[in-house]
Amino acid sequence: MDLQKKAAQLRTKTFEVITQAGGGHYGGSLSAVEIMTVLYYDVMNLSGGIAAKDRDRFILCKGHSGPPLYVILADKGFIAEERLKELDQNGGSLPKHVDRLKVQGIDYSSGSLGQGLSVACGMAASLKEKYPDTRVYALLGDGECDEGQVWEAAMLARQYQLDNLIGIVDYNQCQIDGRTSQVINLEPFADKWRAFGWNVLECDGHDTNALQKTITQAKLHHGQPTIIIAHTKKGRGVSFMEDNYIWHSGKITQEQFEIGLRDLEGRG
Ligand SMILES: Cc1ncc(C[n+]2csc(CCOP(=O)(O)OP(=O)(O)O)c2C)c(N)n1
């Protein structure tokens, strides 16, 4: 499968679904599309279906980026395509922030940032015993890494040598109300993870080949958890949204929708 092309299709669908919902979290949804595409269409073992106990798990720590995940779950047939129309609607079955009790295929309910990595640690610790080949992938936001609990989890993962845990940071350098460097500067970010005892890898988070290679490397690493710092752009692909924190979330006009669609088609 051409993963780059697949990601482009999923990005357009994500943009449409958020717009149809009346607006939402465009920025951090569009930045994470290639990461989720590579995980769900190449890397993760889901061959036994969602109910398989030994399948890989995906913890979306930044729960506001649910739309691309819903689009993927629908594309893979885990949820009905029709449900995408219910995103963030009153009484609808697809909440804006992901909820494992409402949507089959969601492994963790989130929205409150900073807690997902701790849950991923617990899952990884218990799975390691029973299913040594199963991996837990956790997708964090860079703004989310301002939360102290992320670093508590980081220490724990090292302590228990959770090499079946692979964290990926969607390093789009923006959060809700500013650039990450201006709100709380995370740099030297890679060094921080190293100091916490993690294996650290970096790659272009929009290049599916680079993501595949880097995740494969992470899977081969033993004795330590791995963090992948994936360099991305918030609002990727839509000209007026790209790299602009203003579009963390919002509503768009019909005219802006058409501009966005043209931008996304142009990128192919
Ligand atoms: C504990 C907590 N504090 C604050 C918020 C409000 N909030 C929602 S999204 C966001 C910014 C997140 O930035 P980042 O993690 O970089 O996400 P991305 O840019 O990838 O969307 C904040 C502060 C929250 N959801 N949870």
Image (cartoon, rainbow, N blue to C red):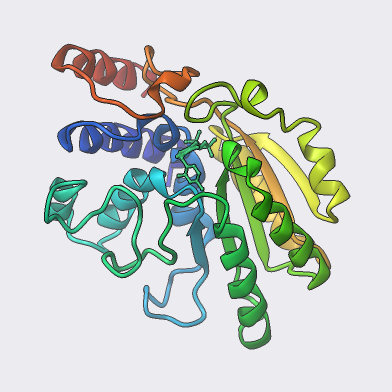
Q: Does the rendering let one see residue 50? A: yes
Q: Is residue 260 left or right of residue 133?
A: left
Q: Quadrant of residue 106?
A: bottom left
Q: Does the rendering let one see residue 217? A: no
Q: Residue at x 82, y 69 (%)?
A: 159
Q: Residue at x 29, y 21 (%)?
A: 265
22 or 130, nearer to the observer = 22
Q: Is residue 138 left or right of residue 255?
A: right
Q: Is residue 218 left or right of residue 236?
A: right
Q: Quadrant of the C terminus?
A: top left
Q: Position of residue 263 (x, y in %)?
A: 32, 16
159 or 56, nearer to the observer = 159
133 or 187, nearer to the observer = 187
Q: Is residue 265 left or right of residue 201?
A: left
Q: Quadrant of residue 105?
A: bottom left
Q: Residue at x 35, y 66 (%)?
A: 100
Total number of numbered labels? Answer: 0
Q: Position of residue 231 (x, y in %)?
A: 62, 31
Q: Position of residue 215 (x, y in %)?
A: 65, 51
Q: Position of residue 136 (x, y in %)?
A: 58, 66
**Please, is residue 258 above or below residue 176 in the view?**
above
